Image (cartoon, rainbow, N blue to C red):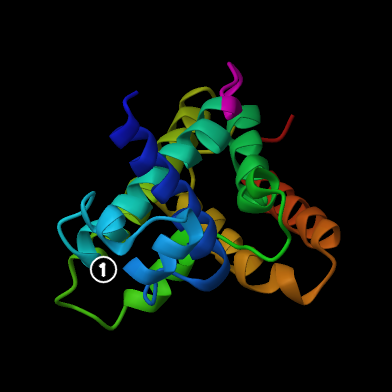
Amino acid sequence: MNKGERTRTEILKQSIIYSSQYGLADITIGTISKLCKLSRTGVISHFENKEDMQIAILQFGEDLFQQRVIKPAWCEDPLEHLITLLENWADWTTDMFNEHHVSCPFIKAVVEFQNRPESKVRTFTIDQQNRLINYISHRVERCIEKNRLKPSVASNVIAYELYSLYLGHAITQHTTVIKSADGMFKNSVARLLKQYQPAH
């Protein structure tokens, strides 16, 4: 990795942390230049414009999500795989940044850009979340194929329910003790999945 690549990586790292705290919509070249102790020109040289920078931040965050949530969740048992995936997801930003005043930057971005139909960032956030929901749906399908979940409900419906649980957790976790919120989320996931498991 050359100096330019290292600088770009540091910019994106500081930006995803900032976005996890304050959101993506109002992030500026000036904000990032201060965080990274660079000139505005030093930041601008790595991106075509603000939208390009915001999309690069989200892509960088997705790469981190893959490393911290998706890959470590792999398990031969499909149901354990699904449960571990959701447990890793529960509070991944807090664990990764060792900071309790952060939350999922992707959810923040979806909310911030939902009423900006012409925004390329909005399009990217929607595609990003759809990729995640599809991934969860595929994990549910694998559970059904291996008889770990019943085929009575479509996999995309169960994925939607699990995703909705996470949305609620992401928003309400800061209204209570973090560890309590994590426990409640995990218990809610377990109860939801239990109703779809075949009787033994």
**Figure quadrant of residue 104:** bottom right
Q: Can residue 61 be spotted in the picture?
A: no
Q: Which residue is depicted at the point 46% across and 35% down?
A: 66
Q: Are there few (<14), some (14-19), or many (20+) residues within 10 Å of tag 1?
A: many
* Drawn side of residue 157 relative to residue 116, left or right: right
On the image, the x and y values in percent for residue 40 come to 30, 63
Q: How many marks?
A: 1
* Location of residue 28 with respect to 10 vertically, above or below: below
Name the spot of residue 14 as percent of width and height, x first: 49, 53
Question: Which stretch did the figure color magenta?
Answer: 72-78
**Residue 112, above or below 179:** below
The x, y position of residue 126, in whole percent, is 29, 61
Q: Is residue 48 magenta?
A: no
Pick the residue in front: 144 or 174: 174
Q: Residue at x 32, y 75 (%)?
A: 113
Check disc 1 and report the residue beneath it.
Answer: 122
Q: Is residue 49 left or right of residue 141?
A: left
Q: Among all residues in the image, which is located at the extreme top?
A: 76
Question: Quick one: 28 or 92, which is closer to the camera?
Answer: 28
Element type where label 1 sits in the image: helix
The quarter of the image holding the C terminus is top right
View extreme (bottom): residue? 115
Q: Residue at x 60, y 46 (%)?
A: 89
Say left or right for 156 vs 163: left
Asked if residue 87 lies left or right of residue 156, the reply is right
- Residue 115 is drawn in which quadrant? bottom left
| Amino acid bearing label 1 | Arg
